[in-house]
Image: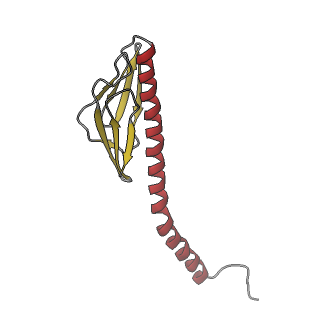
């Protein structure tokens, strides 16, 4: 009596080979996409925090500021401190570390922050004037 209900070793090895090849092709691009999405989410959150800090400087006499560090930034003001971490593969390479807005909403020290990650280089530019910062990706 022959038992035909299972797979042969050759069939099993062929399926494992196909799965391995597909994994080698798909997984690296998946991780790169995930890193880009994490960076995008981080910069959206950072934009919201910077805009909130700018608005608070316009409408309240508080001394809110954002302090940039190598792996996180700190929003301080009103006796409160909020720490936001950068994604794991994102590093700040800029020297100036403080963002402050005047009572009129203009940035006190216009500057450019440069972030490096596996998915590219990002520049966060705070220009002169009341406008928001903008992001350049390369």
Residue 137 place in picture, x, y as percent: 38, 49
Vertical relation: 107 (above or below) 29: above
Residue farthest to the right, as pictured = 1
Q: Is residue 29 left or right of residue 98?
A: right
Q: Residue at x 69, y 78 (%)?
A: 6
**Residue name at image x 41 percent, y 42 percent:** 87
Q: Furthest residue to the bottom?
A: 1
- Residue at the outermost top position: 61
Image quadrant for the N terminus? Answer: bottom right
From this viewpoint, is residue 52 visible?
yes
* Residue at (37% x, 46% y) in the render: 136
x%, y% of residue 42?
Answer: 44, 39
Vertical placement of residue 64 versus 89, above or below? above
What residue sits 53% from the left and 70% below the top?
22
Q: Residue furthest front?
A: 129
Query: Residue 110's x, y, as percent?
Result: 29, 30
Residues 134 and 116: in front is 134
Task: Count all numbered tags in the image, as a single digit.
Answer: 0
Note whether residue 89 is visible.
no
Location of residue 36 in the rendering, given as x and y in whole percent from the top left corner: 45, 50
Quarter of the figure with residue 91 = top left
Residue placed most toward the observer, 27 or 47: 47
> For residue 112, which quarter of the picture?
top left
Please, is residue 133 above or below residue 22 in the view?
Answer: above
Quarter-wise, where is residue 55 in the image? Answer: top left
């Amino acid at each position: 009596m022959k038992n035909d209900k299972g797979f042969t070793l050759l069939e099993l090895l062929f399926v494992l080979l196909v799965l391995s090849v597909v994994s080698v092709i798909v997984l690296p691009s998946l991780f790169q996409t995930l890193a880009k999405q994490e960076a995008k989410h981080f910069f959206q959150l950072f934009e919201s925090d910077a805009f909130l800090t700018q608005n608070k400087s316009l409408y309240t006499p508080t001394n809110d500021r954002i302090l940039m560090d190598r792996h996180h930034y700190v929003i301080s003001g009103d006796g409160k401190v909020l720490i936001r971490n950068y994604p794991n593969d994102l590093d700040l390479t800029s020297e100036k570390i403080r963002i402050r807005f005047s009572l009129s909403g203009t940035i006190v020290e216009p500057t450019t922050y440069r972030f490096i990650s596996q998915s590219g280089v990002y520049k966060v530019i705070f220009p002169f004037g009341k406008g928001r910062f903008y992001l350049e990706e390369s």
